[in-house]
Amino acid sequence: MTAFFSRHGALALALALASASFPTFAETRYVTDELEIMLRAGNGTQYKITRMLASGTQVKVLEEADGWARVTTPRGQEGWVLSRFLSNDRSARERLEIAEKQLAELRGGGDTLQKKLVAQQAENQRLLDENHSLTTRNTELDRELNELKAATADTLAIVRSNRLLQGTMKEQASRIDSLERDNAQLRDATAQNWFLYGAGTVFGGIVLGLILPRIPRPRRRRRGSWDTL
């Protein structure tokens, strides 16, 4: 029995020594809410104190043995502290300070969000007013477009009427020109006829004037005795 315990004791001691000789994986821990803890040169109270670590100080744990942890500070100072004074979470006081800071930021952010909300509401109202104005203007433009279409239709009708009238006037002018030419020809023919009639009359008179003197007159009978009877 004594040999059994001695063998197991030796095994446990070997395991303890092995665990102490091989450092564990480095992890982040924080000094607990104790005001200060002592950073010592070795893993025991007999070693000198090299530094006092304030509550909330972040340290990196390099190894642990016999209730002690070998740590290093953010400034690169290395030493041993009691493991029970380390926590995986930040100190309550630091967490409270962080929470208060976050709350203040949230409150400030709430004011900012409120201001943004008010500004956004004003912008939305402006856009609604602008949309209403654009809708009204669009209605007016539609009405003006319809009036323009109607006016354009009337104008096109007038243009077509004018073109028809111009065509009719051209036709009438052509007819008038034709009638004037016919009248001129008739006048020329009438004048020519009258000229011919006059010339014929004059010529006939001349002929008669030349012929009549040449016609012999009948002789008168002498009065004789038989006439006295």
Image: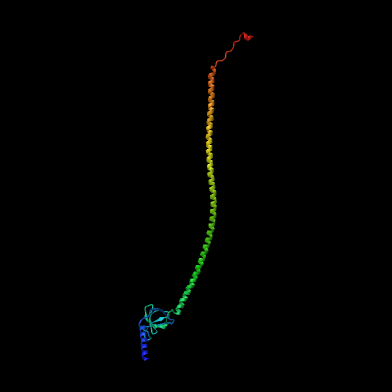
Give the quarter of the figure containing the N terminus. bottom left
Please provide percent x and percent y for residue 204: 54, 22
Q: How many marks?
A: 0
Whether 173 is drawn above or below 203: the answer is below
Looking at the image, which residue sits at the far top?
Answer: 225
Look at the image and tell me whether residue 58 can be seen: no
**Residue shown at 40% from the left, 83% from the top:** 83
Please provide percent x and percent y for residue 26: 38, 78
Looking at the image, which residue sits at the far bottom?
Answer: 2
Please provide percent x and percent y for residue 45: 38, 86
Give the quarter of the figure containing the C terminus. top right
Image quadrant in which you'd find residue 217: top right
**Residue shown at 54% from the left, 55% from the top:** 142
**Residue shown at 53% from the left, 51% from the top:** 149
Whether 176 is drawn above or below 213: the answer is below
Image quadrant in which you'd find residue 218: top right
Look at the image and tell me whether residue 113 can be seen: yes
Closer to the camera in the image, 183 or 100: 183
**Residue shown at 52% from the left, 36% from the top:** 178
Closer to the camera in the image, 129 or 176: 176
Image quadrant in which you'd find residue 85: bottom left
Please provide percent x and percent y for residue 91: 44, 79
Q: How are the colours assigned in the image?
A: rainbow
